[in-house]
Image (cartoon, grey):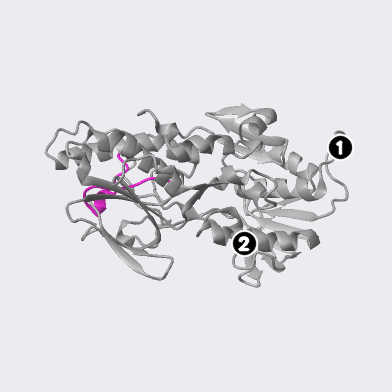
Amino acid sequence: MASDIKNIVILGGSYAGVSTAHYLLKHVLPKLPNKKAYKVILVSTSDQAMCRPACPRAMISDDMLPQEKLFVSIPKAFKQYSQGTFHFIKGTATELDHTTRSVSLSLPDGATEGIIFHALVIATGASTPSPLLGLNRDVEYLRSSWTAFRQALPSAKKIVIVGGGPAGIETAGELGEYLNGRAGWFRSEMVRPKVDITVVTAGTRILPILRSSLAEQAEIYLAKVGVTVLKNARVTAVEPQDAGTEQVGSKATITLQNGEKLDADLYIPATGTRPNTYFVNKTLLMSDGRVDTNPSTLRVDRAGPRIYVVGDAASYARPGVHLILSAIPVLCTNIERDLLVTESKPGGEDRSYKEDKRETQMVPIGKSKGVGAAMGYKMPSFLVWLIKGRDYWLWTTGNLWSGKQWAKPS
């Protein structure tokens, strides 16, 4: 690439990365005095974006959700912009040198590429312990994991899901209703489920973000689809060790801290996520692996000028799509300010981000029930189904991937 081009590199092709790219191309680059000198480069391990929250249902069968909405081509979504302003690279960041302001990439064919950047946005998100529940690599890897799981599913009689957060509970609810159906109106639980499904959590209750009454209601809904919840149960070992991670369709034995052993035909670890920050210098990371982020400006202050982070790889807020989307305008406004300053133009004041810490989480349980709260207010089951449970947010992602959500600055 020409040396006089100033590269704005965005690492990550999911909610945070795609949204940042659209917002910059629509509202920031056009305002720069020397706008033709800039190019937005989006780097992602996958050339398709996907609605990750839909995985608990989508992994069961391609018939569960419309595939053309579940997976969307990233290059196609950015064809709307002028030639030369955007470039997509399918690759994986392997090393960030924040002193020389360069990032090294590994490409699918085994080749490597280095990019010098003028500005950098780290939006690499986080990986799930189970490859069934996220786009940890590319779509091909995800689909191969789903295929292995689907092949083992018909013969499974015992399924163990470890993790009491939304991913674990949603997965249990989807599998429970799919395999066992739902108990009748007057039954509090399914007496003889076809498949024994157990959720194991080390916590005193499931869904710790939500109030305890909602967690209790979730347990009631789970019981209706044949799911048992085992609380205060910490896992100490899984045999074989790669069960549920590399071998998603294999049998497993799960050992608990009290010595109890659970045999499973299928084992799904759903114990949170791991930030994708392995390529970042450890001096820039928090103890939990997230990038140490200025919680107000979303800059990485210790990394030098014009380096930012947004999304689940950042430390400014807890993980959550709604929190990512509220951060995008703040991030891009501050990028605009910094770029203007480099051109000796007044950039204006920084824009400040403030995390919304109110109780907000929606957890579908099967195709018709769910629990949740929004902005601190309890939501009825019907509303959780209407907003999220129908299609796990697919009704919203079309505008997001295409950039229509960012048609106007906000």
Residue at 52 percent across and 37 percent down: it is 398
Residue carrying label 1: 184
**Where is 34 relative to 139, above or below?**
above
Q: Is residue 307 magenta?
A: yes
Question: Which x, y percent locates residue 193?
Answer: 84, 51
Of label 1 and label 2, which has the lower sequence position?
2
Amino acid found under the numbered disc labelled 1: Gly
**On screen, residue 349 above or below 132:** above
Q: Residue furthest front?
A: 83
Magenta residues, start to end:
297-312
Residue 204 visible somewhere in the drawing? no
Q: In the picture provided, is 329 more to the left or to the right than 208?
A: left
Specify the label residue 83 is tagged with: none
In the depicted view, which residue is nearer to us: 216 or 372?
A: 372
Q: Which mark is residue 145?
A: 2
What whole-number distance in Å separates the C-alpha atoms at marks 1 and 2?
Answer: 34 Å
Q: Residues within 10 Å of mark 1 (few under 14, many from 20)?
A: few
Give coordinates of residue 189: x percent, y percent: 83, 42
